[in-house]
Image (cartoon, rainbow, N blue to C red):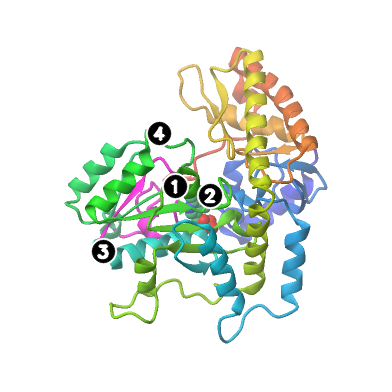
Amino acid sequence: MNFEKSNQWRIKAKNLIPGGGHTYSKGDDQFPALSPFAIQKGLGARVWDIDGNEFVDWGMGLGSVLLGHAFPPVVEVVQQELQNGCNFIRPSFIEAEVAELLANTIPCAEMVKFAKNGSNATSAAVKLARAYTGKEVILRCKDHAFFSIDDWFMGNTAVNAGIPKSVQVLTDSFGYNDPQSLIEKINYHQNNVACVILEPAATCEPQDNFLQKVREICTQYGIVLIFDEVVSGFRFHPKGAQYLYGVTPDLASFGKAMANGFSISALTGKKEIMERGGIDHPYERVFLLSTTYGGETHHLRAAQKTLQLLLQDDYAITKHIWQTGKTIKEAYNQIARELGISDFTKAEGIDCRPYFSFTNTLGEQDPFLRTLFMQEMIKSGVLLQVIIPSYSHRDSEISQTIEGFEKSLKVIAQAIEKGNTKELLVGNETKPVFRKYN
Ligand SMILES: Cc1ncc(COP(=O)(O)O)c(C=O)c1O
């Protein structure tokens, strides 16, 4: 594969843009050296880079493209709406129209506020919770990778440069599927806890009624329960993972898959809390998500169309997404077993969003093996970090991916057997996004 133009573009982009792009997880440190840097276009479940190489895409715009790149029914409504202009002096009628659709769909959504990014929506939820409870501490799930670019969250990670200590100490963490750790932290902070925030499920599902227990604990202590559904929303179920697992939070944030890649997010929740951000109550005002682009009409139309499609045909799209992930997981694990390397690598996680684990002979995570696998998959025309299925991943993408697994896992088996991973890998291993130094 030829990456000549990509390699030139990399230099230019890194000179002009810190990190070379606009999302850390798309960065050079997240991919092997032998990979495309710059994408030119996408269609369905495939993308083409600027050298003209074609790939099956398992990244799908960081999970935002649920239906497929340039999915015609969504593109059509966006194009149509753009004929009418996209931003006006007062709210467009479409804002309340789409808010009503969400309110009728998502269990906790008595009110809805739109924004552009998941971070904006989760940070707004946290602010609202603090204003509503008059408390300060935020308890976030430590097993969930990311909630927001904002200080309340980043201050509680390794990448906390530029964030005052006084802000850092106000966020603490608890474990997923570990209700006792939550109670301990609430007691430690002497019930100065404004909110508990977690994804309903991320890398594993809730065990032993965990979410119900968290709900009960929050109610008991007067703490606002926030579900970050930026990833799970619309992917796990059109009505949200809160519907799937039968637990209703006080507030929930949505983003990513909600508009098939167009930029829109939503804060949803109980009226009693949400209306603190309004202009018709007697309490102290909360300046909640006031953005120039929050009501951009064509993005709202994209969200409306995406959700309408998800809700039709007995949730056929959702079923396809879960089945696709399951097929990929099973195929991977079967091949790994046949090659005798299933102690070192597995496809794991929830079927609608599987991931791969790689461990060395000491049982430690092995970033070199992971990167080598990604490198070899790219040679088979498959671009992946984890598996993010979309409605456009069909037989041809699945079989090309499984053929890629067969070839790549042979190389992985050889690397494990001969202990020569680093020799087979061109360039550096991938690195965690949340690290203190480069
Ligand atoms: C669980 C979760 N919450 C929030 C965010 C932030 O969303 P955005 O990048 O749209 O700001 C992300 C982004 O990856 C996420 O994975």
- Tell which circle, 2 or 1, labels the residue nearer the N-terminal end: 1
Camera-near label (4 vs 1) is: 4
Q: Identify residue for label 3.
A: 133
In this rendering, position of residue 243 left or right of residue 151: right
Which portion, as a residue range, is magenta? 136-164
Q: CA distance from mark 3 to mark 4?
A: 29 Å
Q: CA distance from mark 3 to mark 2?
A: 27 Å
Residue 348: x, y in percent?
Answer: 55, 30
Residue 161: x, y in percent?
Answer: 38, 55
Considering depth in this image, is 162 or 66 the residue closer to the camera?
66
Residue 398: x, y in percent?
Answer: 74, 34
Q: Is residue 139 magenta?
A: yes
Q: Which residue is located at x 22 percent, y 52 percent?
A: 221
Q: Identify residue for label 2.
A: 231
State yes or no: discs 3 and 1 in contact (Cβ < 8 Å): no
- Tell which circle, 2 or 4, labels the residue nearer the N-terminal end: 4
Considering depth in this image, is 125 or 14 the residue closer to the camera?
125
Give the number of the disc on residue 207.
4
User: Circle 4: is it few (<14), some (14-19), or many (20+) Cα within 10 Å?
Assistant: few
Mark 2: is the Cβ under 8 angstroms from ligand 1? yes
Q: Is residue 27 visible?
A: yes
Residue type at mark 3 is Thr
User: Circle 2: is it few (<14), some (14-19), or many (20+) Cα within 10 Å?
Assistant: many
